[in-house]
Image: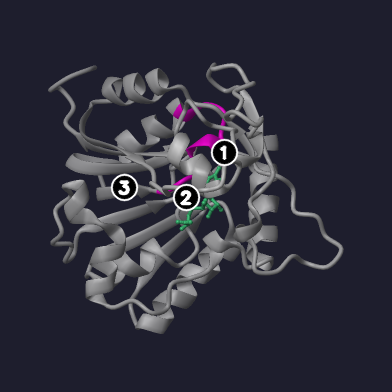
Amino acid sequence: MSAVRDEVYHYNAERWEALVEADALFTRPMLDLDAEKAQAYLGLERLGIPGDLADRKVLCLAGGGGQQSAAFALLGADVTVFDISSGQLERDRLAAEHYGVGIRTIQGDMRDLSALDDSSFDLVWHPYSLTFVPDSRIVFREVARVVSRGGYYYLMCANPFFSGLTHESWNGEGYTLRQPYTDEAATCYPDQDWVYSQKPDGRRIREPREYRQTLSRIVNSLIGEGFTLKLLSEVRNDYPGAEPGSWAHFMTVAPPWLEFVWQYSPGVVGR
Ligand SMILES: C[S@@+](CC[C@H](N)C(=O)[O-])C[C@H]1O[C@@H](n2cnc3c(N)ncnc32)[C@H](O)[C@@H]1O
């Protein structure tokens, strides 16, 4: 259990328990995988990450919910899931039980990974969550400590330029940028309808509260921690003819997410 217990911690912890109760998209475990589907889902080949995972130590960082943990475990990896939400971790355990594989789950805040040993992971897999904390540099320092030399860090995060923007920002001509492009600028927006399969009666799920991480902060901090960039991908889709103001159109105009693959090679650059 990590020691961080500030307002950011409590907001996220409470929100994610509510999202689990509402069976939100990111909390639904994947229960129809086999090894082939798991490889396709993770897309390691596309990312240039070695696909032979037998006995490789994988950390799913802020990656609870029973999706990636199950896929990695099915491919033979030794999986640890670290997440703020006990409900999310429960779904990882449920998926692991479903497939008859073993995983380790740890509840805590990604800004404090002291529950994990130094240099203990071959791959840190970090799905969307970086912008839930104000200062990503704290997280990067922790990742650098727990990843082994030569190990990989997969980071999927909000595209810093469009963080806080959604299709609802359509103004008839384009998507209006309003918030300042500064580190830790708070961004808040409503969840998309497709996130939920059910909303708990009478309970409002609080909006995501996020903090912009500029591109220079992300890249320079990771270089400074001793990482080398292996791949950058802008996650986007082309939906020709999509209705302006729709999510599909927004994704075509303003790719909402970035994916990075970093390799830990201290002493080569940075530091
Ligand atoms: C969008 S989900 C990503 C994981 C999910 N497996 C997926 O792929 O959709 C974000 C995850 O980050 C976790 N989270 C939010 N804030 C966190 C924090 N400060 N430390 C650790 N985990 C956090 C949430 O509980 C949630 O499981």
Beta carbon of the mark 1 residue lies under 8 A of ligand 1:
yes
Q: Which amino acid does label 3 sit on?
A: Val
Tag on residue 124? 3
Left or right relative to 111: residue 210: right
Q: Do the residues labelled 1 and 2 touch (CB within 8 Å)?
A: yes
Residue 90 vertical placement versus 250 (above, below): below
Q: Position of residue 269 (x, y in %)?
A: 17, 19
Per the image, label 3 sits on a secondary structure element best described as strand
Classify residue 225 as left or right of residue 126. left
Query: x and y percent of residue 53 in the render?
Result: 18, 62
For label 2, the SS is: loop
Q: Is residue 233 above or below residue 267?
A: below
- What residue span does the magenta drawing correspond to? 127-136
Magenta stretch, overall SS:
loop
| Residue name at image x 52 percent, y 40 percent | 250
Q: Measure the C-alpha gap from mark 3 to mark 1.
A: 18 Å
**Which residue is label 1 attached to?**
132
Graded by Cα atoms within 10 Å as few (under 14), some (14 to 19) or many (20 or more), the crowding at tag 3 reads many
- CB of residue at label 2: within 8 Å of ligand 1? yes
Task: Specify few, some or many for label 1: CA neighbours under 10 Å numbering under 14, 14-19, or 20 or more.
Answer: many
Q: In which quarter of the image is residue 225?
A: top left
Q: Is residue 203 visible?
A: yes
Give the residue pinned by disc 2: 62
For badge 2, the amino acid type reads Ala
For the C terminus, the image quarter is: top left
Q: What residue type is labelled 1?
A: Phe
